[in-house]
Image (tube, grey):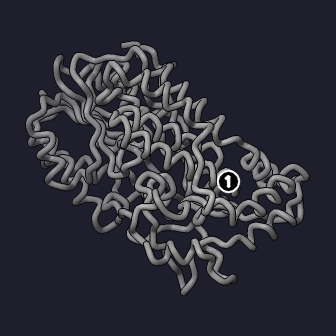
Amino acid sequence: MMNKNLGSLYKPVQYLGAKTRTLDAIISECHRLYKKESYVVDLFSGSSLVSQALYLNKMPVIANDVMRFCSDMSACLLNIAKTNDSQSLLKEAIKGVSTCQIDSEFFEPFKEYIDNEERLIRTKDLHGLKNLYSQLPIMSNETIEPSRQVKYIREHIGKEAFNGAPLITNYYSGSYFGIMQSIRLDAIRCYIEKNFIENGDFWVHTALLTALYSTLSTIVHSAGKHFAQPICITDIDKNKITNIRLFENRSYDVDLLFVGFLKEILAKTGKQKTLQPCVSSCNNVQDKCFANLLEDKNISVIYADPPYTAQQYSRFYHVPEVVRFYKYPQLQQHRGHITQGLYPDGKFKSDFCSKTKAKDAFRTIFELVKKIQCSFVLSYSESKKDATGNERMVTRNDILSIAEKYLPNYKSKQLRFDFDYRQLNSSAKIVHDKEDKEFLIIFEKK
């Protein structure tokens, strides 16, 4: 089977472990096992690339992810709840982007910092920029007297920020994003919510949010364009690659990017259709409520690409998740100080990333497949040097042993792909001679 229209895929964010290179094989196997008028379930939908590809190949999808920003991206790009008026409403929303502002009361304390930041970026003054950011009156700056906005936030932890001090500016400016960039991100996030309250169009809401996530991913100053930690400014060598990228990242115009992404979303979602509407859910696959969601659905295939290492995805993508809910988070502390990554307390921790819990987590998936009586396609990446690479919480043999118990009558096969799989370690820990290999394991219901 040749995959159709894959050039129409929209890549909303830089996402770790995205299945770009194995996508053809995944779609081909799912299509071979797919039965008409049924669903394919994408258990860990992430950036939605697999779900989009299934959808483009006329397979209705139930896309699920435990992170809400991921379920937003799937809802947008699978045209969920899109009405005849949605596209015109989104075009109208685009017109209002340039005029949206945060309250002048909240903007004024940052005005001088913004003016100085613009000059320092223009002149590429690393030392000046580092010094400016160290003086910012924001949540993470523990060396200065808390500002009026910081005091307000501390009194409203866990509350929505739509009518209060700008969240992104007071948490992430000067680290993940520039100051002016943060102000505009806050203004746009508030505009998105106001637009949803006024027109109530779910698809437009998810489209606006998806474009915002794309903007965050493009301008963020961090390794790999994820959000595990911002890159610290080293003001010694302006030609250092991270410093060159700092000025590139800080020079992005948030409004232009955001509107550009909205237009791309409009272009790539305009004519897509399947015989039945897709579904986007935000659930832990181990929860009973997720199994209940699937009970009344006709499902022929489940596809899964769970995390396999101790690296929690909630650590890499906490910023878009916080921006999505737009509630002031309590920042995590280590030894009495706020962490460099500015992580929120209470991040979701997946059992698939735990050495002691991963096997039971996989048993849950196989129980689900057995209960639904469908075929199962599983992506797996194998590390040959577990001690020094990203150790897998379960081995391929572990998975095959679990499958034998739950799916004894299924026909199974494995596809191996001959390319290296990206490691998530710091550069000091990367094993250059290791051979992480990607597999597709197929369990076909006879």
Q: Residue at horizontal 16%, vertical 46%?
A: 404
x then y, percent, for residue 396: 33, 49
Q: Residue furthest front?
A: 104
* Relative height, residue 17 to residue 201 (above, below): below
Q: Residue furthest bottom?
A: 336
Q: Quadrant of the N terminus?
A: top left
- Return the residue nearer the eye: 316 or 442: 316
x then y, percent, for residue 372: 11, 38
Q: Residue at horizontal 63%, vertical 57%?
A: 104
Place residue 42 in its image quadrant: top left
- Return the residue nearer the eye: 56 or 197: 197
* Relative height, residue 328 to residue 363 (above, below): below
Q: Is residue 436 visible?
A: no
* Relative height, residue 351 to residue 281 (above, below): below
Left or right, 359 with reference to 101: left
Q: Quadrant of the C terminus?
A: top left
Number of callouts in the render? 1
Q: Is residue 183 visible?
A: yes
Left or right, 18 with reference to 297: right
Q: Check disc 1: other Cα within 10 Å, few if <14, some if 14-19, many if 20+.
A: many
Q: Secondary structure at mark 1?
A: loop
Q: Residue at horizontal 55%, vertical 42%?
A: 14
x then y, percent, for residue 127: 87, 66
Q: Residue at horizontal 55%, vertical 40%?
A: 214
x then y, percent, for residue 149: 58, 71
* Relative height, residue 190 to residue 269 (above, below): below
Reading the image, the residue beneath label 1 is 221
Type of the residue with mark 1: His
